[in-house]
Amino acid sequence: MDKLRGMETFIAVVESGSFTGAATRLEMSAVMVGKYVALLESQLGTRLLERNTRRQSLTDAGRVYFDEAKRVLEQVSIAESSVERLRAAPAGTLRVTAPTSFGGCVIAPLTASYLQRFPDVRIELDLTNRRVDLVEEGVDLAIRIGDIHSDDLVAKYLCPYRMVICAAPDYLAHHGTPHTPADLVDHLCLSHTVWTARNEWRLPGVEGEVRWKRDAILRCNDGFGLRMAAIAGAGLLLQPEVLVADELANGRLIRVLESYTPQPRPVHLLWRQDLRPLPKLTAFIAHIIKQAPSVPSPFQGEG
């Protein structure tokens, strides 16, 4: 049996709390997980886990072995990283996380062009709006929107994240064009269900801020669905500019209230501090920074 694989499997069982959880994490069957643990216990001559039909717990030997096995695997990872740093060209697996919409529209295409340049790299791109812990989850690079509050990470400004208010030509022809946020009272507005009184968008009005209409005619939990509804003439749409760039360019959606959109938020690249970062990461960061200004619409002008 591969001793390191056995250690990895045992650690996964402990951290996930079950053989089934470990199997999902390691992409193997629960039966195979059980075989690895059984063989490991046989080689060590002692039980590492106490198991019954409802729960499992570590034995005294299991607790000691768990701590030492984690140290061994960490040292193996350090050794592999040290060797990888000696390579002239980027290689290995790069783990990247980005917000769902921005990541899908901007980062995914840039990832494709990066992989064409560096075919020895494999990228795991996690698109999520969850705040990922780079250290705890072993992520190499994060793209985040908004202000950064972290002293233990390197942050590099990438671009502004602009919002736009728009509507289909047919809608504007039927309902008229709003000229100030106060005009929203006479218009049909579309809204995302994640917007609440706590995080809804506020527009800079003539006298203070004006809330984006909370009595929206349509609420949806999917940005694509909202765009399709807006294109069909359902109402005014407030969305990140990058998501509607094509529709604005081809005239399917028209900008309105351009002087009253929310202030752009900054987009940053974040990565862990390392005196000798791996070529796969430094090359990816350089690629994103170089290519991002060429992305249509949201990257022009500012940044």
Image (tube, helix red, strand yellow):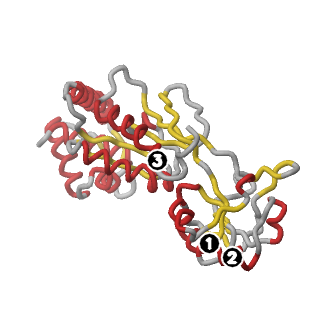
Q: Nearer the viewer, mark 1 or mark 3?
A: 1
Disc 1 designates what residue?
230
Determine whether, in the image, residue 136 is placed left or right of residue 115: right
Horizontal and vertical percent position of residue 132? 48, 43
User: Front-most of 207 and 213?
Assistant: 207
The Cα atoms of the two marked residues, 1 and 2, are separated by 9 Å
Q: Residue at x 37, y 34 (%)?
A: 286
Residue 50 seen in render: no
Q: Residue at x 50, y 38 (%)?
A: 158
Contact between labelled residues 2 and 1, with CB atoms less than 8 Å apart: yes
The Cα atoms of the two marked residues, 1 and 3, are separated by 26 Å
Q: Mark number for residue 98?
A: 3
Q: Amino acid at mark 1?
A: Ala
Depicted 40 relative to depicted 72: above or below: below
Q: Secondary structure at mark 1?
A: helix
Report the residue that reaches farthest toward the top: 275
Q: Secondary structure at mark 3?
A: strand
Dot 1, how many residues are within 10 Å of its Cα: few (below 14), some (14-19), or many (20+)? many
Q: Nearer the viewer, mark 3 or mark 2?
A: 2
User: Front-most of 145 and 131?
Assistant: 145
Report the residue that reaches farthest toward the right: 207
